[in-house]
Amino acid sequence: MKPKVLATYIDHTLLKPDCSESEIQQLCEEAMHYGFASVCVPPFYVNKATQLIRKDESQSVRVTTVIGFPLGYSNTPAKVEEIKKAVDEGADEVDAVINFCAVKNKHWSYVENDIDSMCTAARLRGKKIKIILETAILDQEEIVRLMGILLAIQPDFVRTSTGFNGADTSHEVVQQLRQLAGAKMQIKASGDIHSFERALSLIEAGANRIGTTAGVQLMRGTKG
């Protein structure tokens, strides 16, 4: 895969809790240099990232942030307000975490309302939303049930994981989500993606976007 092609898949990510403003600036500069799809930053830095990237009107790099991250059990109205605030500060895309407590207790109506409310908040403002599952802590029945809900609501993407649970996203998981989603949703793979070979494997499995802290490393490992 050519470097310019791979770059369009990458959400260049920095979400560690103690990240600095200088690190966010470096992240944005790298994203603009390589032509990544987006930078994914904490809500606190959305305004800063927007200012840095929008200074160059030729840039197509988008600003992504996270909602209810990383545990997902914030109340639905709080998540909706997070989305509104992020969009007001310049976010183009939001990656929102589902409520795992509700899933594990089979409160499916709550889960559906939570997801639908977040998707509606993003859509009303013309922004893309990725719904984050945490596939490593979900069983097969839960994954299938959640994908059924997502197919009915149709967010722009389903994202495999937060990347904070210590589990890798496998080729098989992405393949399963692609089979369940068909052509109706895009897939973002995230979680310990630090090599060109691994990124390529996930893209071949069906991923449309790669969330990684190692975007520069992936680009340096490209072939062709």
Image: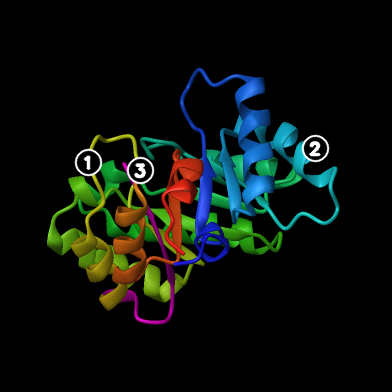
- The stretch in magenta equals 180-194
Q: Is residue 188 in the magenta section?
A: yes
Disc 1 element:
loop
Dot 2 corresponds to which residue? 51
Q: Which one is in front, 176 or 131?
A: 176
Residue located 54% across and 21% down the image: 19
Residue at 60%, 61% (x, y): give it: 128
Residue with the most extreme front position: 224
Q: Nearer the viewer, residue 119 or 160?
A: 160
Image location (x, y in percent) of residue 168 = 24, 45
**Residue beneath disc 1:** 167
Q: Secondary structure at mark 3?
A: loop
> Which one is earlier in the sequence, the residue at label 3 or at label 2?
2
Query: In which quadrant of the rendered view does residue 164 lie?
Result: top left
- 184 vs 168, left or right, is right
x%, y% of residue 203? Answer: 37, 66
Image-based side of 138 in relation to 201, left or right: left
In space, the residues marked 3 and 2 are separated at their CA atoms by: 28 Å
Question: Secondary structure under badge 2?
Answer: helix
Q: Residue at x 60, y 34 (%)?
A: 43
Residue type, numbered disc 2: Gln
Q: Residue at label 3? A: 194
In the rendered structure, which amino acid carries the disc numbered 3? His
- Whole-percent x, y for residue 177 in the image: 28, 68
Closest to the observer, 32 or 68: 32
Looking at the image, is mark 3 or mark 2 nearer the viewer? 3
Rendering quarter of residue 179: bottom left
Q: Are marks 1 and 2 in contact (CB under 8 Å)?
A: no
